[in-house]
Image (spheres, rainbow, N blue to C red):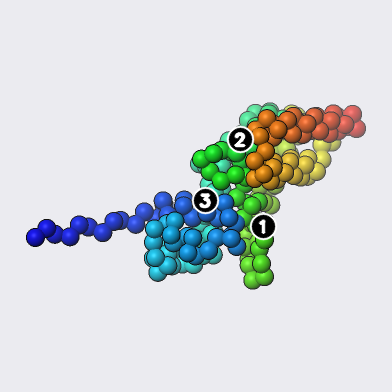
């Protein structure tokens, strides 16, 4: 009599990637336990054993989404000139937001929509992620000032908020199936605003 085959090994990394895409597509609130276990190919018991809870699974999914090897932000901000770094940040994110291989938009923006009472901790987690990204952009602009790539009078906080607001808008436009050329046209205009702000700072300085 033939012996039993070995049970299939649980691939935790693959399961986490699947969960990330579900949360990305449907948001935290819109992703049910049944959706997760069905897509991940595991039982609720296995999910709890591997990840602890839906909340902990979501936290891990957010960490995976923001990991340096998949986020375009660190690479874009390493460009030598500040303007080039900011433009790359916007254009590369816009392209990532409409990549057909993944859900549209930015997970950190979209997963926060429609959070109900009792999930304020999820809202705080995502708000922390947004603040971290905003701080990265501000630090890059401040470095540009320190390296004389930008005028000393540049308002780094305001410029960072401006860039981040454009990123957020691009994400939501991508969720509405906005064509790539339209997203990049928005970035063209956004960079004109950047140039105007930098030029005004140079004049005032």
- The answer to whether 46 appears left or right of 165 in the picture is left
Q: Quadrant of the N terminus?
A: bottom left
Circle number at residue 27: none
| Residue at the spot of label 1 | 113
Residue 87 can be seen, yes or no: no
Please tell me how many numbered marks the rendered image carries. 3
CA distance for labels 1 and 3? 15 Å
CA distance for labels 2 and 1? 22 Å
Residue 128 figure quarter:
bottom right
Q: Nearer the viewer, residue 82 or 25?
A: 25
* Residue 76 in the image, given as x and y percentages of width and height: 62, 34
On screen, residue 112 above or below 91: below
| Residue at the spot of label 3 | 21
Identify the residue at horizontal 65%, vertical 33% (top origin): 180
Identify the residue at horizontal 53%, vertical 43% (top origin): 102
- Tell which circle, 1 or 3, labels the residue nearer the N-terminal end: 3
Q: Are marks 3 and 2 in contact (CB under 8 Å)?
A: no
* Residue 47 in the image, given as x and y percentages of width and height: 42, 64
Disc 2 is placed on an element classified as: helix
Check disc 2: other Cα within 10 Å, few if <14, some if 14-19, many if 20+. Answer: some
| Residue at the spot of label 2 | 95
Identify the residue at horizontal 66%, vertical 34% (top origin): 179
């Amino acid at each position: 009599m033939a012996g039993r085959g070995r049970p299939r090994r649980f691939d935790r990394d693959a399961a986490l990637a699947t969960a990330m895409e579900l949360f990305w597509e449907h948001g935290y609130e819109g992703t049910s336990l049944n959706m997760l276990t069905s897509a991940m190919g595991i039982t609720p018991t296995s999910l709890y054993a591997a990840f602890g809870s839906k909340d902990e699974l979501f936290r891990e999914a957010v960490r995976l989404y923001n990991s340096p090897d998949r986020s375009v932000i660190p690479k874009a901000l390493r460009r030598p000139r500040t303007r080039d770094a900011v433009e790359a940040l916007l254009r590369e994110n816009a392209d990532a937001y409409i990549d057909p291989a993944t859900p549209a938009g930015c997970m950190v923006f979209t997963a926060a929509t429609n959070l109900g009472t009792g999930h304020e901790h999820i809202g705080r987690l995502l708000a922390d992620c947004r603040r971290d990204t905003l701080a990265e952009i501000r630090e890059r602009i401040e470095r540009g000032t320190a390296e004389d790539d930008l005028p000393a009078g540049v308002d780094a906080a305001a410029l960072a908020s401006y860039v981040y607001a454009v990123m957020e808008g691009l994400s939501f436009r991508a969720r509405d199936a906005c064509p790539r050329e339209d997203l990049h046209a928005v970035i063209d205009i956004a960079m004109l605003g950047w140039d105007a702000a930098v030029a005004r700072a140079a004049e005032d300085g």
